[in-house]
């Protein structure tokens, strides 16, 4: 009986040690975020800079949640996941003209980017990882002659109803945000439900 007890205790100890050794800790990191609304596509953008991260974190495992109430009472809350499962009928969150892609786009280390192109598949949210030096970026459309604040008389206004990158990340009425308003930005690691980053970002004009 004593021998059986010792064997069982050894097996239990081995399992416990295995669980400890095989356990994984949730990732951690430091981030900076900017939300700027200057009234036109030329001077407005959303940006998250990855300063440090404990390990590369695939954005397919990260939920981006943005919520806000503008000074005029307009509000919205948007959750971004990626990548879009187009094989099962899911559409990317950004769609304007002939472009359909998942934003915010990724820039920086190990990202292939051609300035003459709007985006590459590798840049789509859900296809890249959070690493130090990575930039997550979205801005409103306007270069095509339609879009956000394309003339002095249409500052803070859209001339079309398409979902450009800024609308995809912040919501269709983000243009109501003004300097001094606050936007809550949160990054959640889905597998561990850990909040990697959360801050009330003050909008700049």
Image: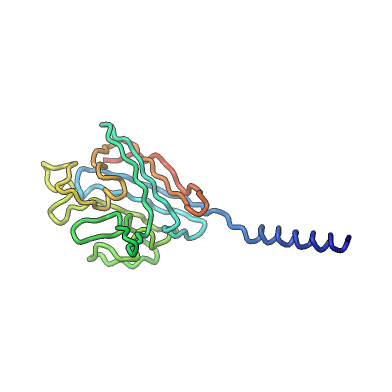
Q: How many labels does the image show?
A: 0
Q: Position of residue 53 (x, y in %)?
A: 48, 55
Q: Where is residue 186 in the image (x, y as percent from the top left)?
A: 42, 45
Which residue lies at the image location 37% right of the left edge and 60% below the top edge? 83
User: Quadrant of residue 91 in the image?
Assistant: bottom left
Q: Going by the image, does 96 lie left or right of 201?
A: left
Q: Going by the image, does 153 lie left or right of 200?
A: left
Which residue lies at the image location 38% right of the left edge and 40% below the top edge? 184
User: Quadrant of residue 92 in the image?
Assistant: bottom left
Which residue lies at the image location 24% right of the left edge and 38% below the top edge? 176
Q: Nearer the viewer, residue 148 or 82?
A: 82
Quarter of the figure that contains the N terminus? bottom right
Quarter of the figure that contains the C terminus? top left
Which residue lies at the image location 23% right of the left edge and 60% below the top edge? 99
Q: Where is residue 55 in the image (x, y as percent from the top left)?
A: 51, 59
Q: Position of residue 122 (x, y in %)?
A: 35, 65
Q: Residue furthest top?
A: 72
Q: Nearer the viewer, residue 124 or 191?
A: 191
């Amino acid at each position: 009986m004593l021998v059986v007890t010792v064997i069982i205790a050894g097996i239990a100890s081995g399992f416990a040690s295995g669980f400890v050794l095989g356990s994984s800790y949730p990732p951690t990191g430091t981030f900076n975020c900017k939300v700027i609304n200057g009234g036109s596509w030329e001077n407005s953008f959303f940006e998250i800079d990855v300063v440090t991260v404990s390990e590369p974190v695939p954005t397919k495992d990260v939920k981006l949640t943005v919520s806000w109430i503008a000074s005029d009472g307009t509000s919205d809350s948007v959750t971004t996941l990626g990548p879009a499962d187009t094989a099962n009928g899911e559409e990317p969150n950004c769609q304007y003209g002939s472009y359909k892609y998942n934003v915010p786009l990724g820039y920086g280390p190990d990202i292939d980017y051609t300035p003459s192109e709007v985006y590459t598949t590798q840049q789509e949210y859900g296809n890249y990882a959070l690493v130090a030096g990575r930039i997550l970026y979205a801005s409103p459309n306007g270069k095509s002659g339609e879009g956000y604040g394309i003339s002095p008389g249409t500052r803070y206004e859209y001339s079309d109803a398409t979902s450009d990158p800024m609308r995809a990340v912040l919501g269709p009425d983000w243009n109501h945000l003004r300097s001094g308003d606050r936007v809550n930005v949160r990054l959640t690691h889905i597998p561990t439900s850990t909040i990697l980053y959360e801050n009330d970002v003050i909008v700049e004009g």
